[in-house]
Image (cartoon, helix red, strand yellow):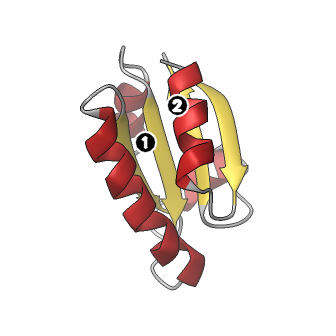
């Protein structure tokens, strides 16, 4: 996954990464919020999900200590991150500022 992940986050479009785990109840709360945002952003950003249990190397590289953790990348660089469930209003503010 590492090579593919690097090519995704190095693109021109901002990438919001949802570091999650299948067993995580708050992650299940975050998912529908991300679906709504994806629809409203209409292709301006891309959202991808990374399972920390299956991609422990990436989780370690980006110092993910809790899930869900959202991390926004622009041109390969992390520009924002937040652990815990992040509400739609806050996420829209962050994404709009980083377009």
Any mark on residue 64, and which?
A: none
Q: Position of residue 95 (x, y in %)?
A: 52, 31
Q: Looking at the image, which is closer to me, 36 or 28?
A: 36
Q: Position of residue 46 (x, y in %)?
A: 34, 36
Q: Is residue 94 above or below residue 98?
A: below
Q: Is residue 75 above or below residue 24?
A: above
Q: Residues within 10 Å of mark 2 (few under 14, many from 20)?
A: some
Q: Looking at the image, which is closer to me, 21 or 39?
A: 39
Q: Nearer the viewer, mark 1 or mark 2?
A: 2
Which of disc 2 and disc 1 is earlier in sequence? 1
Q: Residue furthest front?
A: 89
Any mark on residue 95, and which?
A: 2
Give the residue drawn at x 53%, y 52%.
88
Residue carrying label 1? 2
Q: Looking at the image, which is closer to me, 25 or 1?
A: 25
Q: Position of residue 80 (x, y in %)?
A: 67, 33
Give the residue drawn at x 48%, y 45%.
17
Is residue 21 visible to us here?
no
Q: Is residue 60 above or below residue 44?
A: below
Q: Secondary structure at mark 2?
A: helix
Q: Is residue 50 above or below residue 40?
A: below
Q: Is residue 33 left or right of residue 27?
A: left
Q: Secondary structure at mark 1?
A: helix
Is residue 75 visible to us here?
yes
Q: Looking at the image, which is closer to me, 71 or 6?
A: 71
Q: Position of residue 38 (x, y in %)?
A: 32, 44
Q: Is residue 37 left or right of residue 29?
A: left
């Amino acid at each position: 996954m590492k090579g593919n992940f690097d090519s995704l986050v190095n693109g021109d479009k901002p990438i919001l990464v949802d570091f999650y785990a299948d067993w995580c109840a708050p992650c299940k709360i975050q998912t529908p919020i991300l679906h709504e945002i994806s629809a409203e952003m209409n292709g301006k950003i891309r959202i991808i999900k990374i399972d920390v249990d299956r991609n422990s190397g990436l989780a370690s590289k980006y110092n993910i200590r809790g899930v869900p953790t959202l991390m926004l990348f622009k041109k390969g660089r992390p520009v924002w991150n937040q652990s815990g469930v992040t509400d739609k209003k806050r996420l829209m503010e962050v994404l709009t500022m980083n377009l």
